[in-house]
Amino acid sequence: MVQETNEFTIERYRAILVRAGSLGYRIGPFRAFDGARDRPALLLRHDLDHAIEPALRIARLEADLGVASTFFVQTACAFYNLLADEERARIATIVELGHEIGLHYVSARYTGAKGSEHLRADIALLEDLSGQPVTAAAQHVPTDGEPVSLEPEIAIEAYQPRFTEHPMSYLSDSLMAWRDTRPEELLDARASFQFLTHPENWTEGANGIGAVLDSLKRAALDATERRYEEVAAYYQRLLAERAERDRLFRARRGLPPRR
Ligand SMILES: [Zn+2]
């Protein structure tokens, strides 16, 4: 039965995993993938393009169902700051739930004179954040960038033919528009496939990629406004307490009091 809907909801995502499980699929992340063999394989991939927070729901859902996946994270993202406390905590939670962290990259970052240095630095950063070896990477918008070799640092790249070509298939929710097939149809056919989802797309009531981006934008603007309000209040407090704070600062550093 093909689900004749273009809805992207967490319930639909759950139903796909539950059905794959009941059909005997081997479901897992890239680090554990050993090919499509006796049983069909479902390789679970998530790319985090604009926010990390939406990944938590998917990460928890999968953990509840007893499956693990790979979350590919950008190190040089214009939309989230991987080193901010709250984002580090989110990555740690994803790891605690049993998932793999991979590198999501734009190939231009790893070409040129400093390319391999950047790659090694990015892997080291993700390994520090995740506490895991980082062995898998996935290119961001590969239809809009040159391929680049990540070897010898990275052995697993999501677009290698072993993850996308027969006996595997490749299915992506990119732009919230399926290409020629839907996940339910691949399950019907007992096909092995890499399933790429962007967790931010699988939200209630979002009708298309434009609506998802609008909603992410509103959340980001609210958060930015809140941070500016907080820092303004903080600076006001520093100004009000400046004389006392200056005195304490000098005392802590062993400097004589100002006269
Ligand atoms: Zn991406």
Image (spheres, grey):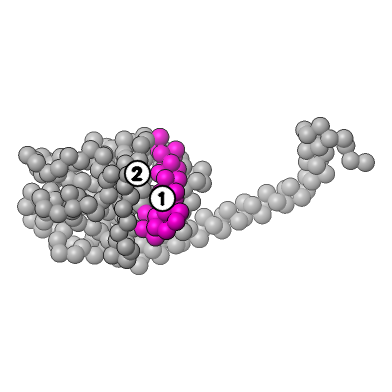
Label 1: few (<14), some (14–19) or many (≥20) C-alpha neighbours in 10 Å: some
Where does the magenta region start and end? 105-131
Q: Give the quadrant of residue 247.
A: top right
Across and down, in percent, residue 166 comes to 11, 53
Q: Residue furthest front?
A: 113
Q: Is residue 79 magenta?
A: no
Residue 174, placed above or below residue 27: below
Q: Is residue 122 magenta?
A: yes
Between 164 and 150, the residue placed more toward the observer is 150
Across and down, in percent, residue 196 comes to 25, 53
Residue on which the image places disc 1: 116
Mark on residue 196? none
Amino acid type indicated by mark 1: Ser
- Circle 1 — which element? helix
CB of mark 2 near ligand 1 (< 8 Å): no
Label 2 vs 1, first from the N-terminus = 1
Amino acid type indicated by mark 2: Glu
Residue 210, placed above or below residue 97: below
- Circle 2 — which element? loop
Q: Are marks 2 and 1 in contact (CB under 8 Å)?
A: yes
Across and down, in percent, residue 15 comes to 19, 48
Residue on which the image places disc 2: 153
Between 37 and 117, the residue placed more toward the observer is 117
> Which quarter shows the N terminus?
bottom left
